[in-house]
Image (spheres, rainbow, N blue to C red):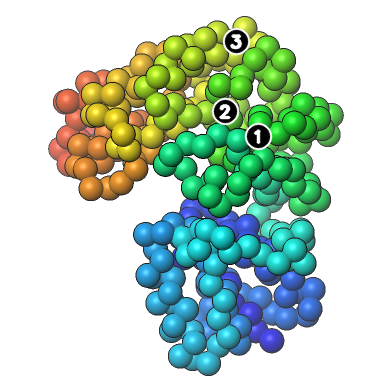
């Protein structure tokens, strides 16, 4: 049987589709990523904004006679893979990955209002780690440091000399001397595996004094501000002034910032995200002086 797995959105490889691929390949089915047609099709959407697109693709493949299954948090937060599929090692060859990818724990004890994790995953619980088969592992844990086994896991990565990328972010509020020491020893990398990097979040203005305190702890153990990237949630329940302040404050500390827009309907916020995430602030230090169109035109002239 020809099986199609369709990724509607997301920049990374789709973990669920990789596990589905393993399941069908174990049954000697042929599996294809985003094929024009197949006997059975799985459609996955991560973001709710793409739900209509996903359902449209599902309907299209049904019209061709395919059996269709839809899933992903963009379609239904409660839909889960059967355990016979969930516990399989992902098919990394589907995307040509040379690193492992998955959860060592799922869920989060926090109940942050804009986050879907409490509704989708529930409280913290451990997950099997049989998916780690490379010397590099991308961790998708919702709150790695909230796991009671965080120390055991970090020691495993250190002893096994496995590089990790915890780009979902570590909870800065949980940073202390004990875990900072181990985080210094583990080979923590950015998404591109090119440099040392630790991901955190600065979602609320009231976290500023806490982050200031944790910066000192991290620095005392050898993790410099330049090795830290903070996701900055903007446009949820904060003002423009608060959003810009957090970004500029992080820059002043020597940290990297990445604006996470709660929505795309605010031109000012879109400009802030471009200025920050595109690293344009290195060329145009004052945000109010930044004009994306004008700056792009200037770059083209200078490039000639």
Numbered disc in front, either 3 or 1: 1
Residue 76 visible, this angle: yes
Dot label at residue 267: none
Residue drawn at point x = 42 percent, y = 30 percent = 203
Q: Nearer the viewer, residue 275 or 8?
A: 8
- 233 relative to 69 in the view: left or right: left
Q: Is residue 86 above or below residue 289?
A: below
- 283 relative to 88 in the view: left or right: left
Residue drawn at point x = 34 percent, y = 43 percent = 262
- 272 relative to 153 in the view: left or right: left
Residue drawn at point x = 61 percent, y = 46 percent = 122
Give the mark nearest the N terminus, 3 or 1: 1
Q: Which residue is label 1 attached to?
A: 144
What is the distance, in whole Å, between disc 1 and disc 2 at their CAs? 8 Å
Residue 283 visible, this angle: no
Dot label at residue 171: 2
Q: Which residue is label 3 attached to?
A: 217
Locate residue 293, reporting x and y percent. 17, 41
What is the distance, in whole Å, between disc 3 and disc 1 at their CAs? 18 Å
């Amino acid at each position: 049987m020809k099986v199609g797995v369709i990724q509607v959105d997301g920049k990374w490889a789709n973990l669920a589709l990789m596990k589905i691929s393993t399941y069908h390949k174990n049954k000697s089915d042929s599996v294809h990523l985003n094929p024009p047609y197949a006997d059975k099709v799985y459609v996955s959407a991560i973001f709710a904004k793409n739900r209509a697109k996903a359902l449209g693709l599902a309907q299209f493949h049904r019209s061709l006679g395919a059996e269709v299954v839809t899933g992903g948090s963009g379609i239904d937060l409660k839909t889960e893979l059967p355990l016979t599929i969930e516990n399989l090692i992902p098919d990394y060859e589907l995307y040509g990955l040379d690193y492992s990818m998955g959860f060592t724990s799922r869920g989060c004890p926090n109940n942050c209002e804009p986050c879907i994790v409490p509704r989708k995953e529930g409280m913290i619980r451990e997950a099997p780690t049989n998916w780690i088969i490379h010397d590099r592992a991308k961790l998708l844990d919702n709150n790695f440091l909230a796991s009671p086994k965080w120390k055991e896991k970090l020691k495993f990565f250190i002893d096994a000399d496995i590089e990790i990328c915890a780009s979902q972010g570590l909870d800065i509020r949980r940073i202390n001397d004990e875990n900072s020491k181990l985080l210094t020893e583990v080979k923590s990398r950015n998404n591109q595996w090119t440099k040392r990097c630790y991901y955190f979040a600065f979602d609320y203005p009231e976290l500023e004094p806490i982050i200031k305190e944790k910066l000192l702890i991290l620095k005392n153990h050898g993790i410099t501000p330049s090795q830290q990237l903070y996701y900055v949630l903007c446009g949820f329940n904060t003002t423009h002034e608060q959003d810009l302040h957090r970004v500029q404050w992080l820059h002043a500390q020597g940290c990297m910032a990445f604006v996470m827009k709660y929505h795309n309907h605010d031109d000012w916020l879109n400009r802030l995200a471009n200025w920050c995430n595109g690293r344009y602030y290195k060329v145009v230090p004052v945000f109010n002086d930044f004009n994306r169109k004008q700056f792009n035109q200037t770059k083209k002239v200078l490039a000639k």
